[in-house]
Amino acid sequence: MIRNSVTFIGNAGDNAALRQAGEKDVASVSVALSNGRDKEPTWIRAEAWGQLAERLATVKKGERIGGQGRLSVETYTDKEGKERTSVKIVLNDLIYLSPKQGEAEIEAPAGADEPF
């Protein structure tokens, strides 16, 4: 079985925004994904619905997050009549990799190898 699944780690490019879509909450944030040292990042939009949207809405600019979800590609026509493509990850799971305000940062044990 082929499955549409994406896993990422990146930094929030802005504060997450929360809005209503019908009766459900939806939140989104732009995320910079590293392409290595001295290379421009790839920017993607992360979107979450329902209870996960409430968690995503607390993400602030610069915080590191990780997530898993499905890739969604949509085409639309902008205000100037040009056809555009929007790529986003619709989240199934979200993890905070930067400590939230008031939390202590988790330190690796001495001598532990860096994961990246």
Image (cartoon, rainbow, N blue to C red):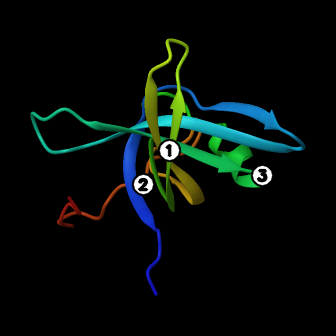
Q: Position of residue 106 (x, y in %)?
A: 42, 54
- Residue shown at 20% from the left, 60% from the top: 114
Q: Is residue 36 left or right of residue 17?
A: left
Residue 15, quarter of the rendered image: top right
Q: Residue furthest right?
A: 23
Give the number of the disc on residue 50: 3
Residues at circles 2 and 3 in contact by the CB criterion of under 8 Å:
no
Mark 2 or mark 3, which has the lower sequence index? Answer: 3
Q: Residue furthest left?
A: 38
- Residue shown at 38% from the left, 52% from the top: 9
Give the number of the disc on residue 99: 1
Q: Amino acid at mark 3?
A: Gly
Q: Position of residue 39 (x, y in %)?
A: 13, 35
Image position of 63 with respect to 90: above or below: above
Q: Is residue 17 left or right of residue 14?
A: right
Mark 3 or mark 1, which has the lower sequence index? Answer: 3
In three-dimensional space, the C-alpha distance between marks 1 and 2, rounded to whole angstroms, equals 8 Å
Residues at circles 3 and 1 in contact by the CB criterion of under 8 Å:
no
Q: Position of residue 102 (x, y in %)?
A: 59, 38
Secondary element at tag 3: loop
Could you classify mark 2 by the number of other residues whose Cα lies within 10 Å: few (under 14), some (14-19), or many (20 or more)?
Answer: few
Provide the residue designation for mark 2.
106
